Image (cartoon, rainbow, N blue to C red):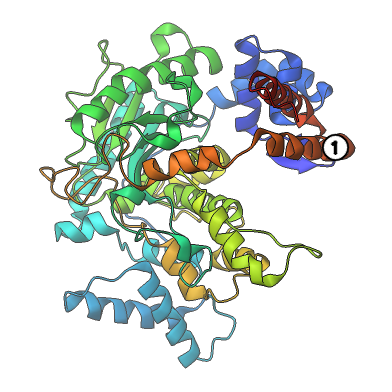
Amino acid sequence: MSKRGKYATLNLEAKMKVLSRIEDGQSVKSVMDEFGIAKSTFYDIKKNRQSILDFVAKQDRPLVVAGQRKRTTGAKFGDVEEAVLAWYRRQRAAGVPVRGVELQAAAERCARRFGRTDFKASTGWLFRFRNRHAIGGRRAAAEGARVDPEAVERFLKKLALIIKHEQLLLAQVYNGDETGLFWKPLPGDTRAGRGDARPPTGTRNQLSAFLCANASGTHKLKSVVIGPSKKPVALAEVPAAAAALPVIYKRGAPWFTRESFSEWFFQNFIPEVRAFQLNILKLEEDDVKAVLLLDKTPAHPTAKELASPDGRIKCLCLPAHASPLIQPMAQGVILSCKQLYRHKQLEERLVVWEQGDEERDSRGEKATAKAQAYNMKSAIFNWAKSWDEVEPATIANAWKNLLYRSEPELDLQGLEDGDYQEVLERCGEVEASLHDVREWLKGDEEDAGYPDDPQRDPAGDGGVQDGEGAEGDEGGQRAAKFKLSKVRENLDCLLDFVDTTLEFQRFYFTLKEMQQEVIKKQFQRGSPA
């Protein structure tokens, strides 16, 4: 969804969401406010409903090719590529693990040696390099096994037969994958980051997230998030109803288990897929079917255990050791979501200074205070918003390797390493280097979202349980420091701003409702000032 003047221009996914809201009986105004569209756009989408649905339903079915993958393009900087690949193979032969940041640093050294001043070892370059040379992530390396090409071929043929025999649409083929997310830390050498009371690793700062979408990119299921606390203080004010959170939050162990995954499959995946195909694709009941591709991990039950009662919605396991190389979610989708999350995290936790603001001496204290106010609730909402912003084209592109044997081209939606450094500099954090930014961005790139050892104690490294820990200690302090009179004053100022700024006027009534509730609480407490 992009902005064009006052209103937004909607992509296919957003138009389908509008149709879903119409199906739910939501008012014209509520849909206009949510998507930032004009009334004429709303009625155009409603009028063209059938043509939009037909376009999605009649997409070409995936044609899986059994032959070897053929690259049509090579690396732009071939000499740098060859030198980095040779270095990487020497490191791996010596048993040295190589992270993404080490590959980027090696590439920049080689580029300087060859005099390639226009070369950038960006996140996009790293993704393409790994994809071209079948360099997987932590799971493949940890298992200590090479990818079996014959097993991959057998799987591709099996998938092709299932798609052909069951006449599956792209919109009926799904993939889901877990990832770990260190939700709190900031890049090193930032004033705001120095206020973090705890180290960047450990379950107190870790969430596990699961992303799932279909091959056309038209159906992204609600992300599942598992946190280390059964009763996180930051979520205490959020109603218990599932609809109150933009994710499916599971309290308890900080990782996925067979039980929690099975619960998601039967309680969420099957109903959501059915609703999408019946209400959005407008398929007949007998045509509702789907296959979910999963990798083999201790956190997943067997494919035989994961099937709907009628057998039409089922799972298919990817071959062992090959999932980081051919699994669609690992082909840039999770990476894109994390890049978007990191950008939102920076924007929310840092202080943007404008001309006329306080003296520079107070920046450190203010930045630290703002960074410390960032809690799990903020992280969950930012993660959900980031998943919502991953483009359907990014998801569809990630399936090219698996379905068509063509190299996916990563589109990070305008977010490369240097963009984060620009945000830091804009907020006065000039000491953080590009290396610091890359270390921060890649800090959890190889975290699978579940322990290597399925017997590992979920609380073994100090996981917070029952709401205990730093967040519990700080929750009361955060609540106590806000005076209703100050909140009222800020809301009044914000309403004046919204009322005089055209592009923000759609938020006026929401803020006005909040202002009225604050005033009501002031009078209840006997302090109307």
Residue at the spot of label 1: 496
Considering the image in quadrants, where does the N terminus appear?
top right
Q: In this orientation, which residue lies closer to the viewer: 263 or 142?
A: 263
In this rendering, the answer to whether 130 lies above or below 389 is below
In the image, what residue occupies the spot 71% across and 19% down?
A: 30
Q: Does 176 sit left or right of 1 as displayed?
A: left
In the image, what residue occupies the spot 76% across and 25% down?
A: 512
Residue at the limit of the structure toward the left, as seen here:
455
Q: In this orientation, which residue lies closer to the viewer: 53 or 370?
A: 370
Q: Is residue 73 visible?
A: no
Q: Considering the numbered disc 1 on the image, is that residue within a helix, a strand or a loop? A: helix
Q: Position of residue 444 (x, y in %)?
A: 36, 57
Q: In this orientation, which residue lies closer to the viewer: 89 or 468?
A: 468
Q: Residues within 10 Å of mark 1 (few under 14, many from 20)?
A: few
User: Looking at the picture, which amino acid does disc 1 mark?
Assistant: Asp
Q: Position of residue 107 (x, y in %)?
A: 43, 79
Q: Position of residue 102 (x, y in %)?
A: 36, 75
- The quadrant in which residue 24 appears is top right
Q: Position of residue 243 (x, y in %)?
A: 48, 20
